[in-house]
Image (tube, helix red, strand yellow):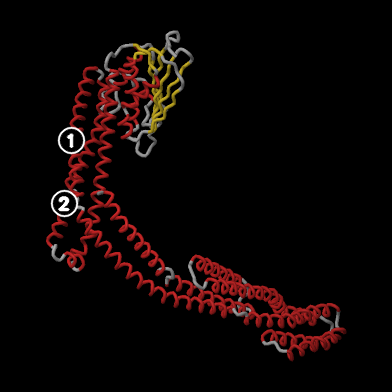
Amino acid sequence: MRASNRLTWLPMVVATAILISALVLLYAKTQRFGESDYFENVALLRHLKQLDAKWELDVLKSKIGINTHYDPLADSLTELNRLLEKLTADMGAQEHDEAAALGEGRAALSHVIQEKATLIEQFKSNNAVLRNSLVFLPTAAADIEQSIVQTRESAQPAARRTLISVNKLLLASMLYSQSASDERGAEIQAGLSQLEAASQSLPPDIRERLAIFGAHVRTILREQKVVNQLLGSITVVPTETRIDELNNTLSGEQRRATAQSGQYREYLLIFSAVLAALLLYAAVRLVRSHAVINRVNQELHGANENLEQRVHELRETQSELVATARQAGMAEMATNVLHNVGNILNGVNVSADLVSSTLRSSRAQGLTRAVQLMDEHTADLSDFLTLDDKGKMLPGYLSRIAQALAQEQQGMAQELGHLTRSIDHIKDVVATQQSYAGGSSLVVPVQICDLAEDALQMNGGALARHQVTVVKEFAQVPVVRLDRARVLQILVNLISNAKNAMANMAGGSHQLTLRVDMVGSSSLRVSVKDEGEGITQENLTRIFSHGFTTRKAGHGFGLHSCALAARQMGGTLTAHSDGPGKGATFTLELPIDTAQAEP
């Protein structure tokens, strides 16, 4: 039967997977060319065109002297390159049918921008020379005038005629810088020739300053022509044309993508209708599987009854543990063991409540109501599932119920596994307690590292609840003969006190270090170090006194009894702390007889 059901469902699953894949593919194709990408690219192209126009405007401003420096030209080039890189990166990350044409367009645009940048760099160089001569030309004329004023009277007439010629050349040069022409340039060149001829009769200092003045005028004649040619070349660089070509290519691609997306949407609608019909058929098959779901529900009830039996066994185990602890007469160890068992029982109760709650709120009742609803519309089931609002929702509702029941079964199986592990853990704790309950003062061969592990296990629940990290530093030590019960009593107390010392350390470290090593060859040393609230200097002298405690819930007997037990075994128990908030270390040292030690 199961094999037949699997063969029946397999074609439906394959068909559903194919339809969903087709729908995903069609949806991806409809989203392939997003309008947001197109508009973003167009906005970048428009920004590039605006920056190019501003670039040319800054060139004109630099030419006529409005801009006294060339920083705007450099800033415009930097921004143009940045936008071009962004446009290249965006188009590279997008899918385009015209990728080759767009790549060629971007390359052409980058080429013309670099061409214009080269021309502008040449313009900056020549224009700087031109502007420098235009700035210093009036100064040179003023120097000539000052020298002429200081000449002797015999040379005054010729000097004054020279000054008039200088002023005319100054005016003509300034006009030439604003509106250059060949005729005006020829007039200036002729004036320079006349000025050179007339300067031969003037004093040497005037001739020297006339030479400087003439050099500036010739620079203006030369550089003004070159600057005008560069401006013409900059203007005809087809940057705007290349931007428009890219824009036209993007627009044509977007129009074709919009038409293709419409076709994909039609296919998407057809495949969606087929998938809806297939899901309707699956819903009918799910209704027929109602008997299988009822059987699963019965299995869940059986699991619940088994769970109750296990809980009853657990309570009996707890009673045995309490009786064992009382018979042993070891109140401190029994309290820790019972506390650990209580922690485990809390988890058991939580798991039991969770399973019970799952059974009470099972979705199986919803399935029963759905089947009743379909039974009411047996005569017109097809119309009810396709036309009625409730009927349209029924296939999806049945699918969700099936998934929910599967999840309920999986969750209850996990909780049953957790209960089994918890019960096994309690049995381990009980076995450990029973192994020490026989004789409290019997000296037997002991491996101290195993004894330390047992003490950690007895405090395991409390350590985990307070998120204490245990660091074990166990050296290789021999098996020695010790009073096992008393040593275990001391270790359990020290570990519990270390945990309590770190309980109120908010946001601080919660690390407990348990170290076992040898002191020479005649003593065994066990230390418990915490990173808790620490001990003040005055309390260190009376920490082992009977009745002394720093905790509200403490009785002041634990450390006192530990110190007595260590003394009865011929050893010592000491405490060390660097002060409040710096933790504390308790060290137990016990003498050993190497002649009686066992390997």
Tell me what residue is drawn at x 37 percent, y 64 percent. 22
Instruction: Name the amino acid type tagged 2.
Output: Gln
Figure quadrant of the C terminus: top left
Residue 247 percent location from the top left of the image = 51, 77
For the view shown, which residue lies furthest in the right direction?
201
Q: Is residue 255 visible?
A: yes
Q: Identify residue for label 2.
A: 365
Question: How far, Cα to Cα, is label 2 from label 1?
Answer: 23 Å
- In the displayed structure, 171 sits above or below 390; it is below
Dot 2: few (<14), some (14–19), or many (≥20) neighbours within 10 Å?
few
Near-viewer residue (23 or 535)? 23
SS at circle 1? helix
Residue 265 percent location from the top left of the image = 36, 72
Q: How many marks?
A: 2
Instruction: Name the amino acid type tagged 1.
Output: Glu
- In the displayed structure, 275 sits above or below 204; it is above
Specify which label sits upstream in the sequence, 2 or 1. 1
Q: Identify residue for label 1.
A: 308
Residue 500 percent location from the top left of the image = 32, 30
Q: Quadrant of residue 462?
A: top left
Q: Quadrant of residue 133?
A: bottom right
Q: Is residue 336 visible?
A: no
For the view shown, which residue lies furthest in the left direction?
376
Dot 1: few (<14), some (14–19), or many (≥20) neighbours within 10 Å?
few
Left or right of residue 152, residue 29 in this image: left
SS at circle 2? helix
Residue 565 percent location from the top left of the image = 33, 15
Tell me what residue is drawn at x 34 percent, y 63 percent. 19
